[in-house]
Image (spheres, rainbow, N blue to C red):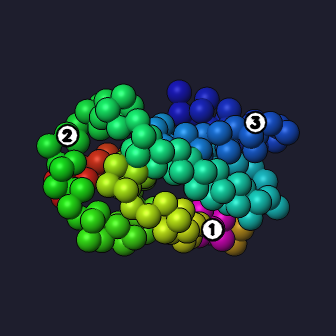
Amino acid sequence: MLKKLYDWTLEKAADKKGERWLAAISFAESSFFPVPIDLMLLPMMLADHGRVWRLALITTLSSVAGAVLGYIIGAFLFEAVAQPLIAFYGYEDKFAAFKNYYIEYGVLIVLAGGLTPIPFKVITIACGVIGLNPLVFFLTCFPARAPRFYIEAALIWRFGRPIQAFIEKRLPLLFTLVMIVGIGGFVVLKYI
């Protein structure tokens, strides 16, 4: 299954619509989709080293646009959409306490959420719920998301071929590690 997903991603990287897929999934990942965009971004970067910077830009812009949707969900659709999402991820008990942190440390939380395995969608929805200044939120999303994607681009650009061979040889192990880090982000968020 992992090999098929990896091959599908490499195929999409070569396809003209690959960038559209990347943008759509990056957008969704910042507002409601549970799968990290890195699982698509990294293989696409590996498939075409010449486009790593473009792919990082597409991912960053789409992620920030998706963050705005997450903010809107939190601000205007909390009961209808955000509350069920929070319940789905099991964050009901911690959400009230988390709101208090936002009031005091909103910008720092957005920055940390964008750079760490903490699910960014939870951060974006929470910002809308507590009413973090929309302009401050929007402007903070760029420095929160861009470094992550541009660091990945720099690593692929610099070490692409050896990293690709390493990934292809150890794909199940690396997928497991990514999932552990992702789940770890949810666990950290749950116990904050």
Earlier sequence position, callout 3 versus callout 1: 3
- Where is 97 relative to 9, above or below? below
Determine if the magenta segment contains residue 138.
Answer: no
Question: What range is drawn magenta here?
Answer: 149-156
Left or right? Give the position of 179 relative to 156: left
| Residue type at tag 3 | Glu
Say few, some or many: other residues with alpha carbon within 10 Å of mark 2 (under 14 / 14 to 19 / 20 or more). some
Q: Which mark is residue 11?
A: 3
| Residue type at tag 2 | Glu
Q: Which mark is residue 150?
A: 1
User: Can the viewer see residue 147?
Assistant: yes
Q: CA distance from mark 3 to mark 1?
A: 22 Å
Q: Main secondary structure of the magenta part?
A: helix
> Which type of secondary structure does the marked residue at label 2 adopt?
helix
Q: How many marks?
A: 3
Q: CA distance from mark 2 to mark 1?
A: 33 Å
> Which type of secondary structure does the marked residue at label 1 adopt?
helix
Q: Which mark is residue 92?
A: 2
Residue 23, by quadrant, is top right
Q: CA distance from mark 3 to mark 2?
A: 39 Å
